[in-house]
Amino acid sequence: MRICSEKDFWSGLMFMAFGLFFAIGAQNYAFGNAQRMGPAYFPALLGSLLTLVGLAIVAKGLTSKIRDDVDKFHWRPLLLVLGSVLLFAFALKPLGLVLSMVVLVFVCARGGPEYETKEVAILTAALLVLVLAVFIWGLDLAVPVWPALLLG
């Protein structure tokens, strides 16, 4: 068996792995039925569907007429984006939402191919307004907005 499209083949395997993980993991919970869904119903159903989609993508990767190789893996963007999310999680309580969001967006933006400080600053300001409007004023979540040192 020959892999024609590496991108389709490997992405299909990834979908299948995630689907099987959730479908098998859901077996530890009560399944229920369509009228009274148990905690396993949604993850098992979604995991099974994701596995089927992955199987179709793998089949496409094995039968595709177009040769499509996988590029080298780019670690820097992955580590910067995931690292910025972890940094946000650890910085939220001591720094507050505003400063944590600034750190999140600026570190995450460094993972992209183009980095313009002015564009990232505008994006940060717009995102801050949206996050404050939705989560603080709209949903009234109990999240510290400013650093604890400033509030006394």
Image (cartoon, rainbow, N blue to C red):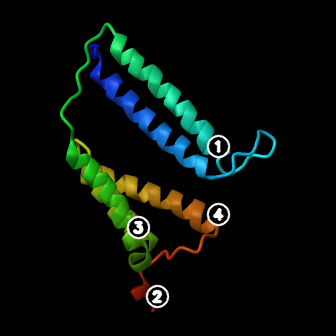
Q: Quadrant of residue 106?
A: bottom left
Question: Mark 2: which amino acid?
Answer: Leu
Which of discs 4 and 1 lies nearer the camera? The answer is 1
Give the position of the C terminus as an image quadrant: bottom left
Viewer can see residue 118:
no
Report which residue position mark 1 lands on.
Answer: 42
Viewer can see residue 61:
yes
Q: Earlier in the sequence, mark 4 or mark 1?
A: 1
Report which residue position mark 4 lands on.
Answer: 138
Residue under the image location 56 percent in, 31 percent down: 49
- Does residue 68 sit above or below 22 in this rendering? above
Q: Earlier in the sequence, mark 2 or mark 1?
A: 1
Which of discs 2 and 3 lies nearer the camera? The answer is 3
Which element is circle 2 on? helix
Question: Mark 1: which amino acid?
Answer: Phe
Which element is circle 3 on? helix
Cα distance in 3D space between marks 2 and 3 = 20 Å
Residue under the image location 53 percent in, 43 percent down: 24
Report which residue position mark 2 lands on.
Answer: 151
Q: Earlier in the sequence, mark 3 or mark 4?
A: 3
Which element is circle 4 on? helix
Neighbor class of circle 1 (other Cα within 10 Å; few <14, some 14-19, many 20+) is some
- Residue nearest the viewer, comparing 121 with 66: 66
- Residue lying farthest to the left in this orientation: 72
Cα distance in 3D space between marks 1 and 3 = 27 Å
Question: Mark 4: which amino acid?
Answer: Gly
Neighbor class of circle 2 (other Cα within 10 Å; few <14, some 14-19, many 20+) is few
